[in-house]
Amino acid sequence: MSDPQRRPRYPHQRIQSVASLSAALNVPEGELAAIAKIASSQYRKAKPITKADGSVRQPWDALPPLKRVQKQIQAKLLRRVEYPYYLTGSLPGKSPRENASLHTKPAIIITEDIARFFPTTRAELVHGVWAGLFGFSEEVAGILTALTTKDGFLPEGAPTSSYLANLVFWDCEPRIVDQLAQLDATYSRYVDDVTVSSSKALTPVEIARCMAIVYGMFGSRGYKAKRRKHEIVRANAPMRVTKLVVNKRPALPKADRKAVRAAVYKLEGIVNSGQPLPDDIQTLLNSASGRVSRLGQFHPTQAAPLKARIATIRERLAHLNDSLALTGHGQKTPSKS
């Protein structure tokens, strides 16, 4: 029997009527029904996301007033769920670093990816979350499902979708965590990326058993693994979890650290060249500054001199602004903010 702390939990009132749902969301009952009726048509395509493996994802942007209602559902219902430690993606207080921290100093790492996760998350799975985990009535679960799905699937990009994506295995995932723990393996899921690790060198039979457990969970909800993303890595090679190296502790890969240094060096060259500054100088500065800040989260010693160089660049740009103001030239350069 699984540890109750490993199961997502909604420790609040079970909503049994649309009137009670209306009061909980602070949205008039008639408005809820009207929006739910046309919800699937209240989306527009957002900019497609091209992943590192070349696959393309299509996110959706909910239109008002549907987005306003979804934000209420997120705030009043989904954010009040108690999420277990192994769910680490797209939730408040969770991060790739927290996900990677569950798998530090492993002897082996197995990574899996759910193929077409959001388009394959059917409305009936979402309904099961509202009726099962939340314990809401069929009527309430039905209207919430209509408000949080599009054409029968979970739309990536909607305010409610990442929360519901974390909950689709709500009743079977705790058992999977327990089964893997019996094999001395640790499990986590970052939305659609699954990681299984062990501090001991698993045998081929144990590895096959771990994979069968995970694939069984996928299949129980109608999902399939993206086989080209399947990896088994041992401690004699760089071991990555959500793009962080975890052989010793969560760290940025060497190539990423080198790229941050290169970005700062490039920015210095532009600013000190004596040539007119490009129109996107503010964007370049913000990007480099953000990358240095992220480096500092994992490698503060390496980031410290880069932060000083960013500060020098800001001072240089401020000086150029002052000089151009005195001469009456209108070159656009960033402020100190």
Image: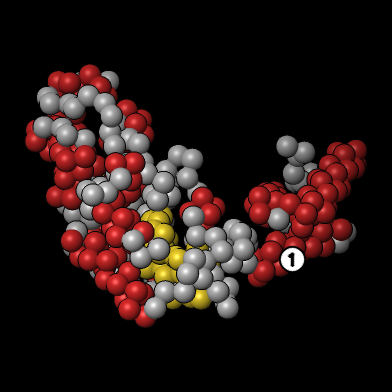
Q: Amino acid at mark 1?
A: Ala
* Residue 144 seen in the figure: no
Q: Answer few, some or many: residues within 10 Å of disc 1's Cα (few below 14, many 20 plus, some between 14 and 19).
A: few
Q: Residue furthest left?
A: 138
Q: Which residue is mark 1?
A: 262
| Position of residue 130 in the picture relative to residue 278 (left or right) | left
- Residue under the image location 59 percent in, 58 percent down: 250
- Residue 184 in the image, given as x and y percentages of width and height: 40, 63
User: Quarter-wise, where is residue 55 in the image?
Assistant: bottom left
Q: Residue furthest bottom?
A: 204
Residue 123 vs residue 312, the one in the foreground: 123
* Residue 202 seen in the figure: yes
- Residue under the image location 78 percent in, 54 percent down: 301
Relative to 85, say whether 37 is above or below: above
Dot 1 lies on which element? helix
| Position of residue 324 in the picture relative to residue 281 (left or right) | right
- Residue 37 in the image, given as x and y percentages of width and height: 13, 37
- Residue under the image location 71 percent in, 55 percent down: 299
**Colouring style:** secondary structure
| Position of residue 241 in the picture relative to residue 261 (left or right) | left
- Residue 230 in the image, given as x and y percentages of width and height: 38, 74
Rendered-image quadrant of the C terminus: top right
- Residue 233 in the image, given as x and y percentages of width and height: 48, 75
| Position of residue 139 in the picture relative to residue 292 (left or right) | left
Relative to 204, say whether 28 is above or below: above
Total labels: the figure holds 1
Residue 239 vs residue 256, the one in the foreground: 239
- Residue under the image location 22 percent in, 19 percent down: 23
